[in-house]
Image (tube, coloured by chain):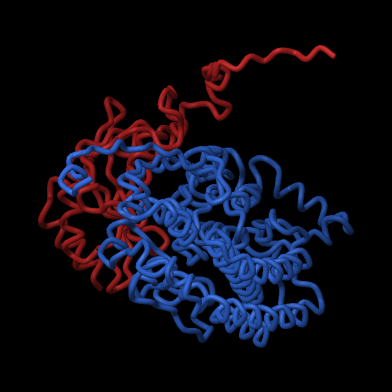
Amino acid sequence: MTRAIEQQLETDRMILNFGPHHPATHGTLRIIMELEGETVVKATPEIGYLHSGFEKLGEDLDFNQYITITDRMNYLSPLCNNVAYALSAEKLMDLEVSKRTEYIRVLMCELSRIADHLLNVGMLAVDLGAMTAFLYGFRVREDIYDLFEIATGTRLTTSYTLVGGLMRDIPEGFDKAVQKVLEEVEDVANDIETLLNKNRIWHDRTKNIGIISKEDAITYGISGPMARASGIDWDIRVNESYSIYEDFDFDVAIALNGDVFDRYLVRMEEIRQSIKICRQSLDRMPTGNVIIDPDFGFSLPPKDEVYNSIEGLIYHFEVTMPNRGMTPPIGEAYVPTESPNGELGYYIVSDGNRTPYRVRTRPPSLMNYSIFSKLIEGHMLSDAPAILGSINVIAGELDR
Amino acid sequence: MLIEQTLAQIEEKFPNSILENTEFAGEQILHVKGQHILKVLTSLKANGFNFLADLTAIDNLTLGGYERFAVSYHLLCHKTADRLTVKAYVSDKKPSLPSVESLWKTADWQEREVFDLFGIKFKGHPNLVRIMNPDDYDGHPLRKDYPRLGRKERYDFPIVDRGINKQKRTE
C-alpha cells in the first residue's frame, strides 16, 4: 500500500475503558480513553466512585469525633490528615499546644511521608514491571507501620491527634525503634536508587513522559512533589512554616523537567530529607505534657485518667455531653499543610456550636489528578500507568 | 505588606463590588458581590495572587450572611507567601456566578464539584456536569436543607439489566 492511500484510509477510534476496577489505578478511578492505534487521543477521567459524603458527615460530628473521619480519607498517610485537621481546629479555637506535642506530630508526619513515598515509588515501579523495587519498599514500609501500631494502637485508622494535643504520648523506647527503622529506610532508599536510577528500561519508560510545565502546574493548582518536580520552589513546610517546622534544618528537593522520572527523583530525595527531620526531632524531643491542661475545659482528658480515676471519667462525660465541651468562636480557619501529595488543608467554618458548620477538605489528589487528561494526550497507552502512578491519586481523598 | 496594599487598591478600583473586608484569626477575608467576582479575581491575579489553592462553597442558611450561598476562593501569592480568602455571595434564586476557569484551569473540576454538591451554576464553564454524584441524581447534598440520611434516592437507582440469565441451580 502506498503512503497516499494509507493517509486516505480512516482508522476507527477505539474507546477503551480503563478502570474503575483495574490493578494499575490503585483505587476506583475510571478513565475513558479514545485510542488511535496505541496512541491516546483523548482521555476523560471520571471520578466519584468513592464519594462517601465525609463533608456532610462532618457537620454532625463534633471536633474530636471528626478526627476519626480524617484518617479514613487518606489510606496511605493518615497521620498527616489527622495533624492537618487538628491544626485547623486549633487555629479556629486559638489553642496553643505544648512543644512536645508539636515535635511528636512532626515525627509522625515525616514517618508517614516516608511510608507514602516508598509505597508510591514502589507502585510506580511495579506498574512498569520492576517488582524488586516495590518489594524492597513495601517491606520497610511494614516496619514503619509497626511503629505506628506501637504509638497509636493501629496501622491505618490512627486517629492519633486530639484538638489540643495527642491521644497518648509515645511509649518508652520508641525513639530507639524509630532510629533502627530509619537506618533500614536509608539502606532501602539506596537499594531502590541503585536499581532504578541508571536502569535503561526505567529511563525509557519514565523520561519525557507526562511533562508538566511550570505554568501548567500553577494554573492547574498542582502542589507538593509534583509541583516541585516542575521547578516550583514551594514547600509549605519552609515557605509558610506551620506547626514547628521552622526549628528543623532540611532541604527542599526540586527538579526541573517535570516528567515522571523527575517526580520519582523528588520523592526519593524527600525520603532522605524526612529521615533527617525525624532524627532531629528525636534528638531534640522536649519533655512535657501532650494534652493541653484538662482544667481548661476544652480537650478530652488522657485515656489513663478516664479509665483509672473517677474525676477523669466524670470529666470525660462532661466534655462529650451536648451543650458542653469545646465551643469555638464564630469564624473560619484554614491551615495549609504539606502532606506527602501536596497542599492539604481543612477549611472549617464555625457558627459557635460544638459541631462545625462546614468542614471542607482541600484534597491534593483532586487538583493533581485534574491535569491527567492533558498529560496522557499523545502518549502511548502503556504510559497511562506510569503517569497515573507518578500522580499518586488517593481515591478516598479525591472523592471524599 | 502586599495584602494590605492590594486590598486598598481593589477597594478603590471596585467600590461597588466590594461588600466588606474582615479579619479572623490573622486571615484576611474579602467579601464580594457574586456577579463581580470575575473582574475582582482578574485584578487580584494581576496583583500577584497567582495560585488558586481552593474553591468551595458555604450554605449560609442558618449561619447568616449577605446571601444564601458564599463561594470562597483561597488565593495564594507564591512570591510573598500571602494568602487571601475571597467570598462571593449568591442568592438562592437560580444561583449563578461567572466561571473563573479562564483564569485558572483548576477551577474546572472544583466548580463542577460546587455545582454538584450545592447547585450553583457557573456561567462560561466549558463542561458543567456533575462530578461526584451520578448524572441522573436529583438534589444537592451539601445544602443545609438536604437531610443527612438522604431523600431515599438510593432506593431509586435504576437496575441495569445486562441480559444475563440468572437461573437457579437445581442440583
Image coordinates of residue A345 in percent, x first then y, are 47, 58
Q: Locate residue A306 relative to residue A223 in the image: left or right.
A: right
Asked if residue A172 shows in the view, the reply is: yes
- Between A231 and A17, the one nearer to me in the picture: A17
The residue positioned 40% from the left and 77% from the top of the image is: A254
Question: Whole-percent x and y of residue A218?
Answer: 29, 62
Q: Which chain is blue?
A: A
| Quarter where residue A154 is shown | bottom right
Which one is nearer the viewer's eye here, A293 or A242?
A: A242
Chain B rendered in what hue?
red
Give the residue furthest to the front. Answer: A1
Q: Quadrant of residue A343?
A: bottom left
Q: Quadrant of residue B58?
A: top left
- Quadrant where the image shows the N terminus of chain A: top left
Q: Residue at x 44, y 66 (%)?
A: A205
Q: Is residue A354 above or below residue A109?
A: above
Describe residue A399's horizontal placement relative to residue B121 as left or right.
Answer: right
Drawn side of residue A23 relative to residue B48, left or right: right
Q: Is residue B20 above or below residue B163?
A: below
Left or right position of A129 against B129:
right
Identify whether A251 is placed above or below A165. below
Residue A386, x across and y down, in percent:
46, 59
User: In the rendering, at what x and y percent does residue A106 appear?
Assistant: 59, 73
- Tell me if residue A335 can be seen: no
Above or below — where is B167 with respect to A188? above
